[in-house]
């Protein structure tokens, strides 16, 4: 069902884009889709909101498919669980709150150090883009993915801060998702671009810690 709706939405988008009078007055969209199938129209709206196309009409990466969005989603889930689904479980002790502060603070420091190295190297910090330079010094000499590691630390710290005990499994799930969805693809790009240099780097420095 979801794939079918996505296909119909893309078909409507293509129809509108090919008309000389533009998508705003597309007859197919106005006279067929709007009155007869509002659910397909909703799917079309979601498709446009979350995907972009380049000048040749090719599908680009989702505009909101970036790690901070996934981190934010995990944080919202943890906060919601802590407010409404505690099941009487708690780790709210002074030592736990202290650990939470260390995790959050450590994550912020890691992000700052990584951002500084990106700035020094004058290369992109944005996922889905190919960096101009391979950074191997500073914090990147300790871990190949300091920002993603920082995200995991911040998530773990906030879960403890919220006392969201049932949300602790979100941390390994988040790490797994980031690795599968971002890290592997980024490393494949760097292997193609930097070749032997990256091969030496990944033998020397671990992916996480």
Image (cartoon, rainbow, N blue to C red):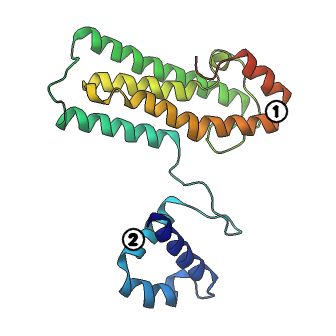
Tell me if mark 1 has few (under 14), some (14-19) or many (20+) residues whose alpha carbon lies within 10 angstroms of its own: some
Q: Would residue 57 be found to the left or right of residue 146 on screen? A: right
Residue at x 55% of width, y 72% of height: 10
Tell me if mark 2 has few (under 14), some (14-19) or many (20+) residues whose alpha carbon lies within 10 angstroms of its own: some
Give the quarter of the image for residue 14.
Answer: bottom right
Which residue bears the numbered disc 2?
A: 42
Which residue bears the numbered disc 1?
A: 194
* Number of numbered discs: 2
Residue at x 38% of width, y 81% of height: 37
Where's residue 25, x and y in %? 51, 87
- Per the model, the C-alpha gap separating discs 2 and 1 is 43 Å
Give the quarter of the image for residue 38.
Answer: bottom left
Where's residue 179, x and y in %? 57, 33
Name the quadrant of the N terminus: bottom left
Name the quadrant of the C terminus: top right
Asked if disc 2 and disc 1 are in contact, CB closer than 8 Å, the reply is no
């Amino acid at each position: 069902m979801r794939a079918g709706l996505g296909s119909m939405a893309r078909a409507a988008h293509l129809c509108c884009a090919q008309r000389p009078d533009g998508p705003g007055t597309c007859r197919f969209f106005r006279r067929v889709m709007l009155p007869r199938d509002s659910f397909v129209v909703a799917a079309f709206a979601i498709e446009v909101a979350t995907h972009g196309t380049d000048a040749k009409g090719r599908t680009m990466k989702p505009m909101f498919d970036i790690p901070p969005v996934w981190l934010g989603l995990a944080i919202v889930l943890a906060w919601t669980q802590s407010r409404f689904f505690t099941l009487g479980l708690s780790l709210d002790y002074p030592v736990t709150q202290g650990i939470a502060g260390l995790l959050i603070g450590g994550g912020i420091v890691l992000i700052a150090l990584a951002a500084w190295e990106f700035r020094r190297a004058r290369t992109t910090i944005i996922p889905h883009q190919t960096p101009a330079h391979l950074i191997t010094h500073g914090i990147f000499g300790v871990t190949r993915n300091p920002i993603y590691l920082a995200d995991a630390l911040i998530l773990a710290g906030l879960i403890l801060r919220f006392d969201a005990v049932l949300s602790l499994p979100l941390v390994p799930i988040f790490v797994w998702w980031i690795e599968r969805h971002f890290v592997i693809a980024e490393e494949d790009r760097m292997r193609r671009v930097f070749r032997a240099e990256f091969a030496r780097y990944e033998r020397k420095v671990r992916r996480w810690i």
